[in-house]
Image (cartoon, rainbow, N blue to C red):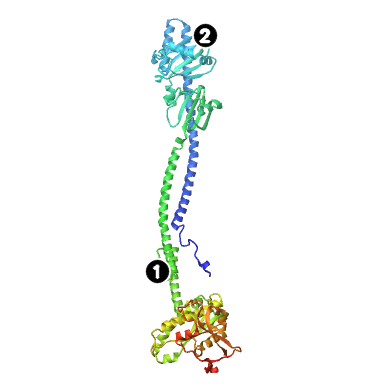
Amino acid sequence: MSPKRDAPRAGAGAVRFPIGAKLVFMVTAILAVSLGAASFLVSWMVSRDLRLNAEDNNLSVNRRAATASETILSLIRSNALVLLRGAAAGGNSGGRTSGASTESFVRFFFEQNRHIAALTLVDRDGKNRSFINSRFGSGVLDPAAIAAYTASRQEALARAAAGDTLLLTVSPPASSAGPPDEASPPAMPLLGFFFPAPGQGAALVFFSPEALEEIFGAGTNTSFLVNDEGDILVHPDPLLAGTSAATDPLVVLARQSGKPFMQTLYTGPDGTRYFGAFSSVSQGYVITRIEETVVFEGIAATTRRNLYLAGAVLFLAVIFVWFFSKTISGPVKLLAAAAGRIKNGEFEISLPVQSADEIGFLTARFTEMGRGLAERERLKESFGRFTNPAVAERAMRGELSLGGETREVTVFFSDIRSFTAISEKLNPHDVVEFLNDYMTRMVDCVNKTGGVVDKFIGDAVMAVWGAPLTAGSPAKDALNCVKAALLMRAALCEYNKGRGGDKNPVIRIGCGINTGEVVAGQVGSSRRMDYTVIGDAVNLAARTETLNKPLGTDILITENTWNLIGRHLITEEMPTVTVKGKEKPVRMFAVINLKSLEGTKQKKPAALSELRELLGIKAPDVRKVNVNAEEHKYKIGG
C-alpha cells in the first residue's frame, strides 16, 4: 500500500462533534420541538375557545346593559307622561281643591322618582311649564335655569315635538347661578331626556344618571352609553362622562352599520386591541368592550408557566443526557487511547468493563483483540528469529503457500575463511557463542538494506534481495545487496579490532553475488515449509563465493550483477571463470567500493591493492593456481 493511501486524513485525530454535545443537541431539539408544539397547540386551542367565550360574554353583557337601559329610560318616559297627564287633568278641572291635588300628585311623583330632577313641558305655543324636584334644591334647577336651557335646545325640542327621542348631557347643569368654573367638574351631572308628549308638544326630563350607572358599573367588561351624536352619557369612569367618543372606531361602526347589534375585534384610538360589541337603543348605543390582553391574560400566564416548566425540563434533560453521555464517551475515549497504544506496539492492554451494554461488550472484545495481537506479535517475533520477519509476516497473513513464482533477484552467499581450523581450536560452547555474535552483525547488515536471510548453512549465510520484497527494480535490489556486503566488510573491520590468537582469531569472509531469474516460494510439505529461492542463479552465486579465496578478494559479483549496477561501483575485473554446466565463461568483478562512497563507513579503498592491504590478503598469482575442476566445479582463465 502506498504511503499516500496510508496517510491519515487531516484532523482524523480530533473530535469535532463530541457524543455528549450531539446527544444534548438531539434531546434538546426533540424536547424543544415537542414541548413547543404541545404548548402552541394548547395555547392555540385554548385561545380560540377563550376568544369565542369572550365574544359571547361581551355580547351578552352588552345586550343585558342595552335591555336594562332601555327599560329604565322607558320607565322614566312613561312616568313623566303620567305626571304630565295628571297635571293637565288637575289644571283643567279648576278650583283650589284641584290645585292642591295637583301639587300633591307632583310631590308624590318626585318621591317615587327621586332620580328625576325636573320635568318641563314646552307646548305647541312655546310656553314652558316646569315641575321641579325640591330634593335637588332651587340652587341647582329653577324655572329660570330651565328656561335658559330649553331656549338653547330649540332644535332638540323641535325634533322631540316631531316625534323623535333624544338623550343629551346637561353640562354645566342648568342653574341660575350661571356656569361653574371650567376647572372644576359639575357637582351634580344630569341628563336631558327629550321625547314627544302626545297632544302637548315636547317633554324634557332632567334626571340623574345614578340608575343607569348601576347598569354600567366597572368590571372586566366596560359598558357605556352614547347618544346618536357620539357623546358619552354614562360611563363607569365619571371623568369620561360628557366627553365625545365620536371618533372611536366601534362608535363609528355602530352609527354607520345600521345593525341592531354586532360583535367585533377592533383597535382603539390608543392602539389597544379590544373585543367590542354594540347594541342600538332608542336613545343611542350601548357600547361594551374588553381589552384583548385581558381576555388572553390567563392563557398568556399559563403559556409563560409552560415555558418555565419546559425550560426546567430541558435543563434537567440536558444535565441528565450530559452525565449519561459520559457513560458512553468515557469508555470510547479509553478505547481510543487503547487503540493509540496498540498502534504504537503496546498490545497488552487491560480495559475495565464499566457497563453491561454494547459499549461494555466492545470494551471486552477490544481487550481480547489486544491479547490476540500480542500473541500474534510474539509468534511473529519468535518465528522471525528462525526466518526473515517479512516472510513471517506474509506467512502469518496466509499469503505464502506451496509452490512459487519466477522472480529476478540478487542472491548472496558468504562464508568464513578457514572456519574448520578456527572451530577446532575452540570448544563447542565458544563456537556457538562466536557464531551467534558474528551472525547477528551480518544479519543486521542484510536487514538494513531490505534483504531476506534465506538460510544459515553452518558458518555460511545465504540471503536474497527481490523476493519476497523488492525495492522496486532488479537494479535497486542488486545495489542494496552490494551495499549489504560492504556493510559486512565494515562491520568485520570493526569486529576484528583487538582480535588475534587461537582463542580470538581474526575473521575474514568471502561474499559471492549474482543476479538472475529464480523460482521463489515455499518449498516443503503442508506440515513443514521453507521459503527459499531455487535456480541456476543461486548455484552461480554459491560458486562465485568460493572464488574469493584463490583470487584474493572478499566480494565478487558476476557480470549479470555488474551489467545492472557496475556504473555505481569501483570494481576490478578478474579472470573469467568457466563453470561446469555452462558453455560460455563467466566474467567476474571484485568489488572495491561504491563510487559515491555512500552506504559504508569506509572512505577507502579505491583500488584492489588498497583493499588487500586493508584486509590483510596476499595478492595471489592466478596463473599458478592449481584448480581441481571436479572439486571446485570451475576453471580459471579463458
Which quarter of the figure has residue 429? Answer: bottom left
Q: Quadrant of the C terminus?
A: bottom right
What's the amino acid at mark 2?
Asp
Identify the residue shown where x is 44% and y is 4%: 95
Residue 305: quarter of image: top left
Residue 401 versus residue 635 in the image, above or below = above
- The circle drawn on residue 125 is 2
> How many discs mark residues in the rendered view?
2
> Mark 1 highlights which residue?
350
Residue 286: percent from left, percent from top: 49, 26
Disc number for residue 593: none
Q: Position of residue 291 (x, y in %)?
A: 46, 33
CA gap, disc 1 to disc 2?
122 Å
Q: Tell me: residue 440, above or below residue 29.
A: below
Q: Nearer the viewer, residue 89 or 33?
A: 33
Q: Where is 316 relative to 594, above or below? A: above
Q: SS for tag 2?
A: loop
Crowd tier of the residue under label 1, counting other residues whose Cα lies within 10 Å: few below 14, some 14–19, many 20 or above: some
1 vs 2, front mark: 1
Mark closer to the chain start, 1 or 2: 2
Find residue 160 and report its horizontal and vertical position in percent: 52, 16
**Disc 1 + disc 2, Cβ < 8 Å:** no
The residue at the far top in this view is 95
Give the left or right position of residue 637, taking residue 100 as reference. Answer: right
Secondary structure of residue under mark 1: loop
User: Could you tell me if residue 309 is visible in this image?
Assistant: yes
Residue 402 in sight: no
Q: Residue 269, relative to residue 570: is it above or below?
A: above
Of 95 and 384, the residue lying toward us:
384
Label 1 amino acid? Ser
Q: Where's residue 288, x and y in %?
A: 48, 29
